[in-house]
Amino acid sequence: MKTEGGYAGIDFFRIIAAFLVVAVHTSPLLSITDTGDFILTRIVARVAVPFFFMATGFFLLPPFLENQASDRKSLHRFFKKACQLYAISILLFLPVNLYADHFLAEPLIPNLLQDLVFDGTFYHLWYLPATIVGVGLLYLLLQAFQVNMVVKLAGLLYLIGLGGDSYYGLLSQIPFVESFYNGIFSFTDYTRNGLFFAPFFLLLGGLIARQKVTYQVKECLAGLAVSVLLLLTEGLLLHHFEVQRHDSMYLMLIPCMFFLYQLLLLWKGKSNKNLRTISMIIYIIHPLMIIVIRGVAKLTKLQAILVENSVVHYLAVAALSFVCAAILAMQLSRKQKGRLHERQGVG
């Protein structure tokens, strides 16, 4: 099992991934080039969420891949922390949802359950229940099947998700396939969720943690270069032929993420808990920062600069998100140190 020490590359890339997520929701190049913005936000930036899934799987799953049932405490801690974070995030965006009448859609209870379990109660929060559901599903599968079978099942689920995402326009031409996906979309708006998207990359991260082979930098760079080229080709072709229902899932994401993660593992150094905390806070709060920037722009009559200029808009949102996240992370660190000192004092 991998420990949390010595993975500087993974922690550093968490920040990059968080800023890529901000890019997805702000479209930095939109006022300059539509195609360039699509490449950045709808293809390249799509590595962010699979990376977060893989990082979770990398540190959490190895004991369960090795049938170490005694490590269930780590699983319980994960679910507790993840559910607490999700609950806090829901409450944080509750005023915005109430203002937007988000909870007035009928039928209320089924829609609310769909949001809580699959889609998230705000457009970016789907990642949190996806991680929780994905980990839970993998745990159950690993209790019932051998690892090789679980890999095949997770791969099958990803392919199903792929058909409801970037390849939907192709597969939906087949009547029974369209009916199949209509059934899926009756309980979730997208296939990029904890059932179809998260399990494969969570598992991939766990499998990489167990690998005995060490890849060289040249191998990683060559594999990543080829994978990225194929990913760009795939994304642009699917976009050109207008077959995408959504654009979160690509076939070439798999080799791309494999070689990217291998490359990050070669970056040795001390892990940084602050980077982990800051990246997650950026992910959670950046939509609020978008609202703040738009509000400031409206009050100061600077919409042309702060909103309509997509590059400035992105930089403003990213910078404000980072500053707020750093301040919050510092406060959390101080509280944790204070609690630790109190416990040591009591002991």
Image (cartoon, rainbow, N blue to C red):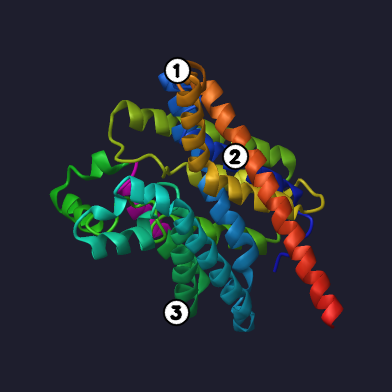
Q: Earlier in the sequence, mark 2 or mark 1?
A: 1
Q: Amino acid at mark 2?
A: Ser
Q: Residue furthest front?
A: 299
User: In the rendering, at what x and y percent does residue 318 appear?
Assistant: 59, 34
> Label 1, on which residue?
31
Percent of width and height locating residue 111: 26, 59
State which quadrant residue 75 falls in: bottom right
Mark 2 and mark 1: Cα distance apart in space: 22 Å
Above or below, 152 against 312 in this view is: below
Can the viewer see residue 336? yes
Q: Tell which of 21 and 308 is nearer to you.
A: 308
Q: How many numbered tags mark residues here?
A: 3
Is label 2 in contact with label 1 (beta carbons under 8 Å)? Answer: no
Q: Position of residue 336 (x, y in %)?
A: 74, 64
Type of secondary structure dominating the magenta stretch: helix
Which of the two labelled residues, at mark 1 and mark 3, occupies the earlier sequence position? Answer: 1
Magenta span of residues: 155-166
Residue that label 2 marks: 321
Helix, strand or loop status at disc 1: loop
* Residue 4, visible in the rendered structure: no
How far apart marks 1 and 3 lie (CA) works out to: 51 Å
**Mark closer to the observer (1, 3):** 1
Asked if the residues shown at circle 1 and circle 3 are in contact, with their CB atoms under 8 angstroms apart, the answer is: no
- Could you say which is closer to the camera, residue 340 or residue 207? 340
Residue at the image point whose x is 31% and y is 42% from the top: 167
Task: Please report contact status of discs 3 and 2: CB closer than 8 Å, yes or no.
Answer: no
* Picture residue at 64% right of the left edge, 39% below the top: 322
Q: Sequence order check: which comes first, mark 3 or mark 2?
A: 3
Residue at image mark 3: 144
